Image (cartoon, rainbow, N blue to C red):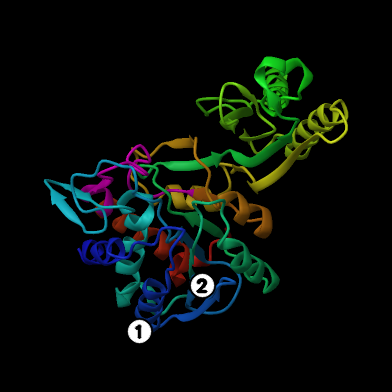
Amino acid sequence: MRAIDWLEHLVSHPTISSAGNLDLVHGLVDALSAAGAVVETFPDETGNKAALLARFGPDMPGGLMLSAHLDVVPVEGQDWTVPPFELTWRGERLHGRGTTDMKGFVACVMDLIETPEIVQDLAKPLWIALSYDEEVGCVGVRPMLAAIAERGIHPDLVLVGEPTSMNIGLGHKGKTAYRARSRGIARHSAEAPLAVNALHALGDLMAGLRRMQEDLARDGVREDGYSVPYSSVHVGVLSGGTAVNVVPSEATMLFETRFPASEDAAALDARIRTMAQELDDALPDGCRLTVKELLSYPGLTTDAAAPAVQRMTGCLPETARPCWLSFGTEGGLFAERLDVPVVVCGPGDMAQGHQPDEFIETEQLAECRRFLERVAAAFCKESLAATPG
C-alpha cells in the first residue's frame, strides 16, 4: 500500500506543536497539486506553520470534506524502545509518533488522492483540510475554518479521521481549560495565621470546583454513550511555595471542564467565574485571585439518522458501531461553523495515541483506505452524488 510509504514519510517529520511543519506541508502541497487539486495554505503568525485546504472536483456546494491534523504530541519523558520519528515494523504493527494520532489517516488520504480513478471526473467536490496545533486546543484549524465558512463551502459531510478503530464517532465532549492564580502575603510559618496563604485561596477554589462536580454528577445534563455521561471538572496542577516554613505568596492552579454538546458551556463558565470573584472579594487588600481561560472548543453531537450519516455508514463494514469519544476533536468546530453533519471515523485506537511506542495495525490502514474509496465515490461521483445529502 502506498499508504504505508506515506506514513513513513509523515512520521519522519517531527511536527510537535513547539516545532514548525512547513517542510511537511510543502511536500503535501506538491503531491496534492500534482494529483490535480487546487490547494491553498493558511500560515500562522510566526510563518513556521500552516494549515492547508485542497479541492478536487468542481467548486460547488456538497461533496465530502476529509479533516485531519498534522501535529503530534512530544516524546520527551517517554520510554520509547524504537526511534519515535522513524517508522518501525513489528509484525503487523507500525510504530512511530503519530501513527495512530493521526498520521495513519492522513497517509490513507494521500494514497487515495494519488489514485486517478478516484479523484478524476467528480460530480461534487472532495475537500482535504489539514490543520496544525490541534493538540494544544484546536488552534490551527480556526483561521482556515473561518475562510471555509466565509466562502460558503458547505459539504454534505465532514469526516474527521481521528482514531476510532473505524467505528462511527457521533459525539465528543467540549473542553475549557483555565489557569487560576492567587497572590497572598508571605511570612514565616511560625506566624502563618498573620499571613495570607496563596495556596489556601486556591484550595478554597478547588473545594468549590469539587462541589460543582458533585452537582453536575447529580443534576447536570446527561448524554448517554460516554464513560462519564455528564460534565466533569478536573484540577490537574496545583503549585506554589518555596519551603514548608514560608507562607507562600504566589500560587497557580490549572483546571478544566469537559462537557457534552448539549450542556450550557457559558453557564458552567459563569459559575466558575462567580465562584472565583466571590473568593477574590473576600481577600484582604493587596491580595488577588484571578481565573483566565486558556483554551476552549465545543462538543459534538451528530444525528445517526441524518441522510449523509446513513450514506457514510453504508460505506463501512457491518461490524462498525456508533461510539462517543472521551477525547476532543476539531469536529465540534466544523459543526458549529458550517452547520453540516460531522462524523469522527479513522484507523487506530486512541489508547495507543500519545503513548511510548505508539503504533497502528496494518489492517486498520487497509480498512481505512477501502472505506475512503467507497465514501469518496458515494459523496462525489456522478452516479451517487445526485442523491440529496
Which residue carries the number 2 mark? 53
Disc sitting over residue 303 in the figure: none
Q: Give the magenta-colored segment's residue range.
A: 344-365
Q: Is residue 267 left or right of residue 76?
A: right
**On the image, which quarter does residue 224 sit in?**
top right
- Answer yes or no: do the residues labelled 2 and 1 have beta carbons within 8 Å? no
Dominant secondary structure of the magenta stretch? loop
Residue lying furthest left: 91
At x 37% / y 44%, what residue is drawn? 354
Inspect this view and state whether residue 286 appears.
Answer: yes
Disc 2 to disc 1, how far (Cα)?
15 Å
Asked if residue 210 lies left or right of residue 389, the reply is right
Q: Earlier in the sequence, mark 2 or mark 1?
A: 1
Counting from the top left corner in percent of width and height, residue 189 is at 66, 19
Which x, y percent locates residue 85? 26, 58
Question: Label 2 sits on what residue type?
Answer: Leu
- Horizontal side of 58 relative to 350 (left or right) equals right
Query: Could you say whether the residue bearing mark 1 is in a helix, strand or loop?
Result: helix
Q: Nearer the viewer, residue 331 or 88?
A: 88
Side of 184 relative to 107 (left or right): right
Q: Is residue 351 magenta?
A: yes
Inspect this view and state whether residue 218 appears: no
Of 260 and 95, the residue lying toward us: 95
Label total for image: 2
Q: Quadrant of residue 281?
A: top right
Label 1 CA crowd tier, 10 Å (few <14, some 14–19, many 20+): few
Q: Quarter of the image containing the N terminus?
A: bottom left
Residue under label 1 = 34
Image x and y of residue 260, in percent: 63, 35
The kind of residue tagged 1 is Ala
**Residue found 50% across the figure and 35% down from its top:** 326
